[in-house]
Amino acid sequence: MARTTLLLLLLAVSVPATARAEVGFRLGSRAGVELHDDADLSFGADMRLSFALSPLTINPAFDYYVDEDKTLFQVAVNALYHLPAAAPHVDGYGGVGVGVTAFSFHQGVQTNDDHGSRLGLNLLAGVCFDLPVVAPYAQVVGSVGELDLFTISAGLLVELGGGERWDSCGRRTAVQP
């Protein structure tokens, strides 16, 4: 155990500071409407991680769906690809990911499967607006699996790290190190 800890510590110290600092970190919240069965509100959290050596942005996310018959939430990890810029300060993106949707029906609802979780494939597309302080965005997410979801949402992202290498939405800028 001590050897492993020492090895990890030496590895962390030996990696150049510029390599460790080349991660863009954005965090935000969102609200939306799930349209598959009926219009249910959703609230969520969104994280965007951009890396210097990858064209993809890793997007862990959490969504809670307000439904009178059941408790429903999804934890997902998506990979986003920023499309070529069509206009300044407007970033379109598409993505694919995997989501685990957990549910539990409230008392009084008779089903064979009243609680559990299901795995699904997420397909998403959105647009983000590169503004100085926050980055508003809107996106459509379709979850395909045993529990199909179709959500339209909007939110705000705040940059918490990453410097000038990326814009507010997570797209690489022309600035070189």
Image (cartoon, rainbow, N blue to C red):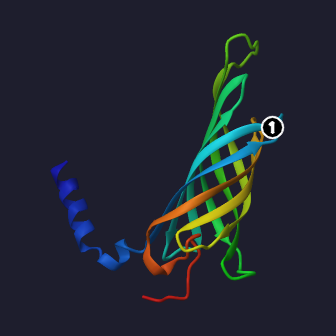
Which residue is drawn at the image coordinates 56% and 79% (left, top)?
A: 172
Is 96 located above or below residue 73 in the figure? below
- Given the image, on which type of amino acid does mark 1 rest? Ala
Rendered position, 73 above or below 59: above
- The picture places residue 119, in percent across and down from the top left corner, at 66, 39
Question: What x and y, as percent, mark residue 76?
Answer: 60, 47
Q: Is residue 89 above or below residue 97?
A: below
Does 177 sit left or right of 57 as displayed?
Answer: left
Q: Where is residue 89 in the image (x, y as percent from the top left)?
A: 66, 78
Say which quadrant the C terminus sits in.
Answer: bottom left
Q: Percent x, y for residue 98?
A: 64, 49
Q: Is residue 124 left or right of residue 99?
A: right
Could you tell me which residue is drawn at 21 percent across and 66 percent down?
10
Residue at position x 76%, y 15% in the image:
111
The quarter holding residue 43 reads top right
- SS at mark 1? loop
Label 1: which residue? 39
Give the crowd class for mark 1: few <14, some 14-19, many >=20 residues within 10 Å: few
